[in-house]
Image: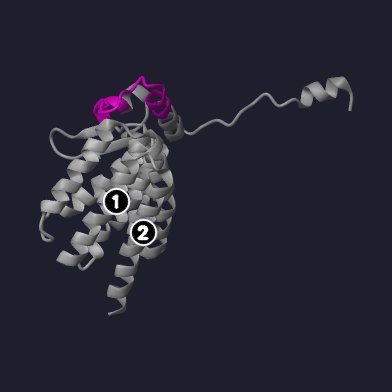
């Protein structure tokens, strides 16, 4: 092939997007660049369609796609509209939570699989928490344990306290991705919803939580990991016994 032929064969074009894709890409770029802020409401759909010079049907397809990507949320009602969702480690947790919930509901995955992965992540999270926790983290963890100790097993706050406890340990690790994943996994497993939460189980859980906090406060990564593994193993074994009955 001659030099002239090679130049003639050179690729200079690129894929031309359909109107729906163009609208989607433009709004996505504005969100990811920060030009559209978290919580900001987009203009009304009729106005937005006019600005892009597309039909309302085309606009709605683009907005639906951005919603499934968790970049937008649609609020109904007279004060509703399309709002920009936060794009940070918390939004990562929301995406994982929604995906896990759907998969568990459909039966594509089972509870024990999620519980196993949760343990695989919470063990290193406890190690990191022992190394990176602040005094504020410790005080918040101790406060949760104090409240758990006083709560009765049928207290509606018990599930939330448990979720906060485990999520706070992951937060104290200093790794935001790890914190988001642990929070999502715990939200979908929430052991206290599946347990026969007797006073005995409640007391054992509080003792185990206290041991975890003590190890993290001492900066003992090995002890913190061991305490978390013991606690989660206890919960899984208790769940297994209940399922076998």
**Circle 1 — which element?**
helix
80 or 13: which is nearer to us? Answer: 80
- Give coordinates of residue 151: x percent, y percent: 11, 54
Q: Residues within 10 Å of mark 2 (few under 14, many from 20)?
A: some
Q: Residues within 10 Å of mark 1 (few under 14, many from 20)?
A: some
Tell me: residue 182, above or below residue 85.
below
Q: Residue at x 32, y 58 (%)?
A: 231
Tell me: residue 160, above or below residue 106.
above
- Give coordinates of residue 79: x percent, y percent: 14, 32
Closest to the camera, between mark 2 and mark 1, is 1
Q: Residue at x 10, y 52 (%)?
A: 150
Quadrant hosting residue 72: top left
40 or 238: which is nearer to us? Answer: 238
Query: Bounds of the magenta span?
Result: 27-48
> Is residue 28 located in the magenta-colored stretch of the structure?
yes
Q: Residue at x 71, y 27 (%)?
A: 11
Quadrant hosting residue 21: top left
Kindly check if marks 2 and 1 are in contact, taking CB atoms under 8 A apart as contact: yes
Where is mark 1, residue-wise? 211
Q: Earlier in the sequence, mark 2 or mark 1?
A: 1
Q: Give left or right: position of 11 versus 120.
A: right
Where is mark 2, residue-wise? 230
Q: Residue at x 27, y 74 (%)?
A: 242
């Amino acid at each position: 092939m001659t030099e002239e032929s090679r130049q003639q064969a050179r690729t200079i074009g690129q894929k031309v997007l359909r109107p729906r894709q163009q609208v989607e890409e433009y709004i996505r770029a504005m969100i990811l660049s920060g030009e559209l802020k978290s919580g900001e409401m987009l203009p009304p759909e009729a106005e937005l369609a006019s600005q892009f010079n597309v039909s309302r049907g085309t606009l709605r397809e683009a907005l639906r796609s951005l919603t499934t990507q968790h970049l937008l949320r649609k609020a109904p009602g007279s004060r509703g509209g399309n709002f920009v969702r936060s794009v940070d480690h918390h939004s990562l947790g929301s995406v994982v939570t929604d995906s896990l919930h759907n998969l568990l509901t459909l039966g594509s995955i089972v509870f024990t699989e999620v519980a196993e992965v949760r343990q695989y992540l919470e063990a290193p999270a406890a190690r990191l928490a022992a190394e990176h926790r602040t005094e504020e983290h410790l005080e918040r963890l101790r406060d949760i344990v104090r409240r758990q100790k006083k709560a009765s097993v049928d207290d509606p706050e018990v599930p939330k306290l448990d979720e906060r406890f485990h999520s706070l340990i992951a937060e104290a690790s200093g790794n935001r991705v790890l914190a988001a994943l642990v929070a999502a996994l715990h939200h979908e497993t929430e052991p206290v919803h599946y347990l026969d939460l007797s006073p005995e189980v409640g007391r054992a859980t509080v003792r185990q939580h206290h041991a975890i906090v003590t190890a993290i406060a001492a900066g003992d990564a090995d002890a913190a990991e061991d305490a978390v593994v013991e606690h989660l193993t206890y919960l899984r074994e208790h769940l297994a016994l209940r399922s076998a009955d």
